[in-house]
């Protein structure tokens, strides 16, 4: 058993225990600590990949930066969709585009897919190996490089730094 993964699992389970019990009574804390230690002992190898190494200060800073980049892209996408909806001729050209990613981590790919889906006007339809298939409300190009630039280029560099 990896001590790093065990500690991460235990802290995570204990935080969930505290969230559900919403009390800092000493008996509740001791009971929660003991129960979550047992659960972490049996499950840390099943659910933990990176352990506490994931919470390095550099990574945490990149996660905060990613959050603000995502918010910026979210606002831009919302304004773009609002512009399309308000436009009298409703100039939408929906379609599915594809692009390749250089991300290797499944977690990074999942977060990229969810970030794309959460921004209005785009929806991740499928991921096959390194290829993303995206339904785009306003297809301006079918070129993979240009589609990548329009959809994922703001997210991918930070995800690489966080997860790889």
Image (cartoon, grey):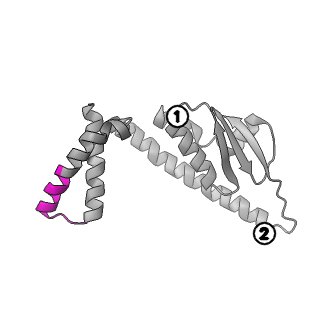
Q: Quadrant of the N terminus?
A: top left
Residue under pointer 1: 160
Residue 151 is one of the magenta-drawn residues: no
Looking at the picture, how far across and down is residue 34, in whole percent?
16, 50
User: Looking at the rendered structure, which numbered label has been put on residue 126?
Assistant: none
User: Could you tell which of marks 2 and 1 lies nearer the N-terminus?
Assistant: 2
Give above or below for 91 relative to 54.
Answer: below
| Residue positioned 70% across, 39% down in the render | 148
Looking at the picture, how far across and down is residue 143, in whole percent?
79, 36
Whole-number angstrom distance, CA of label 2 to CA of label 1: 37 Å
Residue under pointer 2: 86
| Residue positioned 88% across, 65% down in the render | 89
| Residue positioned 51% across, 46% down in the render | 66
Q: Secondary structure at mark 1?
A: helix
Q: Which residues are magenta?
A: 22-34
The secondary structure making up most of the magenta span is: helix
User: 73 or 26: nearer the eye?
Assistant: 26
Question: Which residue occupies the extreme left position in the image?
Answer: 26
Please state if 128 lies on the left or on the right of 27 as rendered. right
Please state if 138 lies on the left or on the right of 126 as rendered. right
Q: Secondary structure at mark 2?
A: helix
Circles 2 and 1: CB distance less than 8 Å?
no
Question: Which residue occupies the extreme front position in the image?
Answer: 42
């Amino acid at each position: 058993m990896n001590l790093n993964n065990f500690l991460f699992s235990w802290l995570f389970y204990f935080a969930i225990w505290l969230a559900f019990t919403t009390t800092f009574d000493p008996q509740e804390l001791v009971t929660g600590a003991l129960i979550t230690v047992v659960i972490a002992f049996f499950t840390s190898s099943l659910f933990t990949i990176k352990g506490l190494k994931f919470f390095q200060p550099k990574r945490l800073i990149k996660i905060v930066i990613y959050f603000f980049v995502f918010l910026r892209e979210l606002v831009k996408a919302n304004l773009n969709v609002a512009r399309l909806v308000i436009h009298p001729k409703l100039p939408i050209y929906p379609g599915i585009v594809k692009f390749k990613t250089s991300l290797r981590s499944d977690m990074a790919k999942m977060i990229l897919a969810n970030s794309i889906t959460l921004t209005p006007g785009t929806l991740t339809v499928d991921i096959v190996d390194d290829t993303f298939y995206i339904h785009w409300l306003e297809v301006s190009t079918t070129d993979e490089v240009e589609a990548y630039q329009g959809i994922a280029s703001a997210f991918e560099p930070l995800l690489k730094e966080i997860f790889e």
